[in-house]
Image: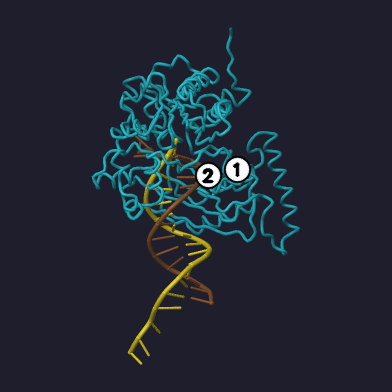
Chain colours: A cyan, B brown, C yellow
DNA sequence: TCTGGGGTCCTAGGACCC
DNA sequence: TCTGGGGTCCTAGGACCC
């Protein structure tokens, strides 16, 4: 059977760990720039605050109900997530970390319900984070079981057999099926399909003709046919991306250059941490999609292929700026920019060129020294002159909690 | 006034080959 | 005047997930 372990209101639960007095009050966590609501406590959900809603639209509710607001602290959440995942390994060797707050486990001991309850108890006890467990034959069904678990008292739900699955699916709205997003849900409803059960009974060929193989797999999974295996080996990344929205739009090319340098630098840093090289570099900029006027809407992107795959800060920053030069249009205000690294390969596997051997070796050792110094003396001690990183950031986080678990200076100090 | 960031996979269509 | 059939590979764009 497949167990889906899902942390309840994860980011909010992380913040509450260190602020237990907020346990029963409405709490929300915001995205970068304190822009949107990305995590809500149950109390906040009851107030009608929606996932992804921009904060300024919810201002009234937040103020009137004394909702406690946090900026997102991903370092902290990442650390807590690591602890939860390593704790989960006790229960199964076959553990797939699916996201920062979710994992699939394959367990073949028939005492399913009790094991599920144990997981809930164990994670709460060892990390303080409440989780829900959904158990079923396939990933897609375990997601549905997980939804029920979240609303049940013991936070654990088992779909025992096909008969039971069928009964549950007949009252599951189509939009709650994992793998069917907004677009497919709309399509289904237009075709008279409104529950998971009616979707499950659709003709397989029809789905394949009108949609695609993924939707067909989702349908089959509802029948208990395993299409998505639980895989404990983490797959190598295929792309790396660093992008940010700016608090205020930017129309000045030099400013944009500084940010793109930063993004290229950070992307390259991630690349080097993963022990990878990149072949294809992509840069994009876009204007504010919420602004009304049509002629100012612009999404510019362009990519560059390196002659020899690289993990060199200088090369990546340099070519990012050349790409930016090519896509930048004067007279527009930009809201967001980003750098994407595609076609990654292991650091020691690359097609070299007989023309550039020596230069490369020298540069490699320079790059290593940059990493070494930045690791040793703190982030961003060594940067490139085109960068912006140490200047005042255009990304604001006004309600950031301390880094209780990742910084010596922020460790909780209780006078007992 | 203010609307996130980082991933994956699939498909259609174009370019190219013989 | 008449212009085929069968492939592969790549990319952009669109869907999905958290």
Compared with A210, A397 (above or below) is: above
Residue in view at x 43 percent, y 50 percent: A286
Provide residue A396's location: percent of width, then percent of height. Answer: 47, 34
Category of crowding for the residue at label 1, using alpha-carbon neighbours closer than 10 angstroms: few (below 14), some (14–19), many (at least 20): some
Secondary structure under the numbered disc 2 in the rendered image: strand
The residue drawn where x is 48% and y is 37% is A395
Callout 2: few (<14), some (14-19), or many (20+) C-alpha neighbours within 10 Å?
Answer: some
Percent of width and height locating residue A330: 44, 56
> Label 1 belongs to which residue?
A270
Name the quadrant of the C terminus of chain A: top right
- In the rendered structure, the residue with mark 2 lies on which chain? A
Residue drawn at point x = 52 percent, y = 22 percent: A123
Q: Is residue A276 above or below residue A154?
A: below
Q: CA distance from mark 1 to mark 2?
A: 9 Å
User: Dividing the picture into quarters, in which one does residue A172 lie?
Assistant: top left
Q: For the view shown, which residue lies furthest in the top direction?
A: A416
Q: Chain of mark 1?
A: A
Q: Position of residue A250 (x, y in %)?
A: 45, 46
Mark 1–mark 2 CB contact (< 8 Å): yes
Location of residue A220 (image quadrant): top left
Residue B10, percent from left and from top: 43, 53
Occupied quadrant, residue A95: top right
Query: Which numbered disc flags the more N-terminal residue, 1 or 2?
Result: 2
The reply to whether label 1 and label 2 mark residues of one chain is yes
User: What residue would you read off at disc 2?
Assistant: A242
In the rendered view, would you say A197 is above or below A208?
above
Given residues A301 and A199, the one toward you in this image is: A199
Q: What is the secondary structure assignment of the residue under circle 1? A: helix
Q: Is residue A16 left or right of residue A212?
A: right
């Amino acid at each position: 059977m497949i167990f889906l372990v899902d942390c309840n209101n994860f980011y909010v639960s992380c913040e509450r760990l260190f602020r237990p007095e907020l346990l029963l009050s409405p709490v929300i966590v915001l995205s970068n720039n304190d822009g949107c609501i990305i995590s809500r406590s149950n109390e906040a959900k009851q107030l009608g605050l929606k996932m992804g809603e921009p904060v300024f639209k919810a201002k009234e509710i937040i103020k009137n109900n004394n909702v406690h607001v946090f900026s997102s602290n991903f370092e902290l959440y990442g650390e807590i997530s690591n602890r939860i995942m390593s704790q989960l390994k006790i229960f199964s060797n076959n553990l797939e970390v699916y996201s920062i707050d979710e994992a699939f486990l394959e367990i073949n001991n028939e005492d399913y319900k009790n094991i599920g309850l144990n997981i809930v108890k164990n994670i709460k006890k060892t990390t303080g984070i409440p989780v829900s467990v959904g158990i079923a034959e396939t990933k897609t069904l375990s997601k549905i079981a997980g939804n029920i678990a979240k609303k049940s008292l013991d936070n654990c739900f088992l779909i025992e057999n096909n008969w039971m699955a069928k009964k549950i699916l007949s009252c599951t709205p189509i939009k709650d099926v994992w793998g069917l997003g907004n677009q497919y849900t709309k399509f289904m409803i237009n075709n008279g399909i409104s529950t998971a059960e009616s979707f499950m009974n659709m003709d397989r060929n029809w789905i394949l003709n009108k949609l695609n193989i993924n939707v067909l797999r989702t349908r089959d999974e509802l029948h208990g046919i395993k299409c998505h295996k639980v895989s404990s080996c983490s797959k190598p990344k295929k792309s790396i991306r660093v992008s940010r929205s700016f608090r205020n739009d930017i129309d000045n090319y030099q400013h944009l250059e500084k940010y793109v340098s930063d993004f290229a630098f950070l992307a390259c840093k991630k690349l080097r941490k993963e022990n990878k090289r990149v072949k294809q570099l992509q840069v994009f900029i876009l204007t504010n999609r919420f602004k009304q006027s049509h002629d100012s809407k612009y999404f510019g992107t362009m990519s560059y292929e390196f002659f020899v795959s690289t993990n060199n800060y200088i090369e990546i920053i340099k070519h990012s700026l050349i790409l930016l030069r090519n896509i930048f249009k004067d007279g527009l205000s930009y809201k967001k920019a980003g750098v994407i690294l595609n076609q990654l390969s292991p650091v020691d596997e690359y097609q070299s060129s007989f023309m550039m051997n020596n230069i490369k070796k020298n540069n490699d050792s320079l790059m290593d020294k940059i990493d070494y110094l930045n690791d040793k003396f703190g982030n961003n001690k060594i940067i490139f002159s085109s960068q912006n990183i140490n200047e005042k950031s255009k990304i604001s986080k006004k309600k950031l909690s301390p880094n209780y678990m990742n910084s010596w200076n922020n460790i909780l100090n209780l006078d007992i």
